[in-house]
Image (tube, grey):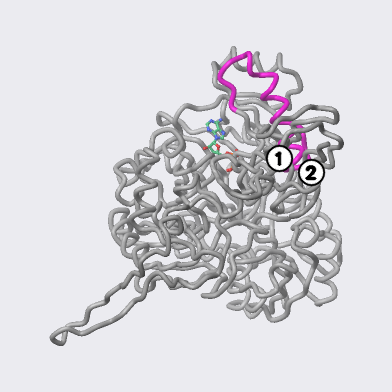
Amino acid sequence: MFDKVLVANRGEIAVRVMAACEELGIETVAVYSDADRDNGHVEYADEAYNVGPAPASDSYLDQETIVETATEAGADAIHPGYGFLAENAEFARRIEETDELTWVGPPSDAMEQLGEKTRARQAMQAADVPVVPGTTEPVDSPEEVREIGEEFGYPVAIKAEGGGGGRGMQIVHDPADVDDALETAKREGKAYFDNDSVYVEKYLAAPKHIEVQILADEHGNVRHLGERDCSLQRRHQKVIEEAPSPVLDEGLREQIGDAARRGVREAGYTNAGTVEFLVEDGEFYFMEVNTRIQVEHTATEEVTGIDIVRWQLRVAAGEELDFSQDQVDIEGHAIEYRINAENPADDFAPTPGTLETYDPPGSIGIRLDHAVNQGDEIGGDYDSMIAKLIVAGEDRNHCIERSKRALEHFEVEGVHTIIPFHRLMLTDEAFVEGSHTTKYLDEELDEAKIADAVERWGTEPLADGSESSETHELTIEVDGKRHDVVLEDLPQSAATETDETDDTSEDDPADSAASSSGSDDEAATMTDGAITAEMQGTILSVDVAVGDEVTEGDIICVLEAMKMENDVAAPAGGTVASVEVESGDAVDMGDSLIVLE
Ligand code: ADP
């Protein structure tokens, strides 16, 4: 077994991996960026090294610095967690090629084969696994896309080879839209995954997202640990995940599990991985393989009792899986809730801030994976996850009842969270029945219900660090009985109570330059004609060129920050004098985007 493992990640997953290391008697090394000096994973580790400034491209994605740090620390293995470098085959290969370091993950060859979607589709077909109908070769021309549309019917999805989480995926309903969609998918693939190759498949109308957890060792053993149902999604991003799926019957469950095992065996895969499928009308179709530990692995751990991260380390160290497929028992039900700092009533816009109160629930059936404490800052540099709450019960109904208790007692103040949304789901007919598909949240759920849930169960972030002077909580006893009383001050003016918009725009119009898809966050400000980024992020597209005339409110570029696409609008009109960014660029707050004259 290893002596010392460097965890090339941050936050809850870094702590999760370190916990497994600790139980195996392995020392741990954390890496952190300037923005994460006080992060929980840094405190948890036996030793920690600063690997650079806040932008991930300069720290958590800096392959060379991370490998050097591992060597300097005397580590003998690197665990990548999820995100960042976890699915980067080049990084894995680099570690495989060193003498002193082991990669805790699948072989780089298998990552390459399964990470590229068309190659993964070929491997699955070779293993007799049904794939979503479409191409198994990259497509280049709009004509090829239209041929698929004609053959299988519209809509079709144009997907980036390296894509995931709905990024780099364009859905086309009409042959006339193919040209634009193809271009956008290529551009997004390039910006997010540095790969502009795309392919086409049929876009299923209302599928379930079912994924199979795999563990494979270097001795030829491949096991599956049952499935997770991740059908509750917002814009193709998972929000609630559970195990097992409420809709699979035993026959289909066995077929999907076997198919997943055959597929990864075909690719010579080892370590942990997830094979994702779409299921519709009793048929299942391979979608993609995630060649890493996933956020939602916890739900599977809760129903199988198998510590997947521990096995990742043991398998990487050459050990053999010590259980047969028949010995994998699924018991009870588990649901994972991502506790994100987002405001569900504002199109789930991230709300960075300070955890003024952080008091998670406890007691039977509750697991919490997190790396934060009360008083911590939820910054805007990375994703908006505060914690993962995993609730286990005897069966799905029990799990739902227990989840109601857990979420009711999860107290967070200082930032918005999606807890009110989760509580809404626990009373939502489609979710409770388990009949929801991947389209349910985007196409069917009445948005007014989300706003009501936030009104009912949400907490307001405190404005700009000012203490909540509007209310005072008192405990009093009347006739020996205890009562909690909240006293409210009268608002100083009606405006402070009701004005939820923003506090900057009134006297300086240039300050409120941004519109964003559904959120009121500012994406840009303007000084002396230069429009600068208001937040760190990635440029997805630039919509103007030098010489263009723009008028106030025109979209000049699209900036992605904290998983939100923000349309950056011109705060004033003018002629574009220079364009300082191109799609794919990482920008910091204050960086100039475009100059108007
Ligand atoms: P992931 O997020 O798992 O890395 P993708 O980006 O391939 O993977 O898919 C994300 C989500 O997009 C899926 O869970 C599903 O909801 C939707 N999706 C992807 N491909 C299709 C398809 N061909 N038909 C219908 N929905 C799809």
Q: Quadrant of residue 6?
A: bottom right
Label 1, on which residue? Answer: 162
Ligand 1 quadrant assignment: top right
Q: What residue lies at 84% left-to-right and 57% top-to-bottom?
A: 94
Q: Nearer the viewer, mark 2 or mark 1?
A: 2
At horizontal 15% and vertical 87% (from top left) the residue drawn is 480
Q: Secondary structure at mark 2?
A: strand
Q: Nearer the viewer, residue 543 or 56?
A: 543
Instruction: Determine if the magenta segment contains residue 242.
Output: no
Structural distance between the alpha carbons of marks 2 and 1: 27 Å
Does 102 sit above or below residue 532?
A: below
Q: Quadrant of the C terminus?
A: top right
For label 2, the residue is 593
In the image, taking residue 471 as reference, residue 147 lies left or right, namely: right
Is residue 195 magenta-colored?
yes
Q: Whole-percent x and y of residue 291?
A: 65, 50
Q: Is residue 133 above or below residue 216?
A: above
Coordinates of residue 132 in the picture (x, y in percent)? 56, 29
User: In the image, 117: left or right of 483?
Assistant: right
Q: Amino acid at mark 1?
A: Gly
Element at label 1: strand
Relative to 344, residue 416 above or below: below
Q: Residue at x 58, y 23 (%)?
A: 156
N-term-proximal mark, 2 vs 1:
1
Relative horizontal placement of residue 557, taking residue 422 as reference (left or right) = right
For image coordinates 64% across by 54% down, the residue present is 292
Residue 199 image position (x, y, % from top left): 69, 28
Please identify the dominant SS of the magenta region.
helix
Q: Which mark is residue 517?
A: none
The residue range painted magenta reads 171-197
Q: Position of residue 268 (x, y in %)?
A: 69, 47
Residues 285 and 262: in front is 285
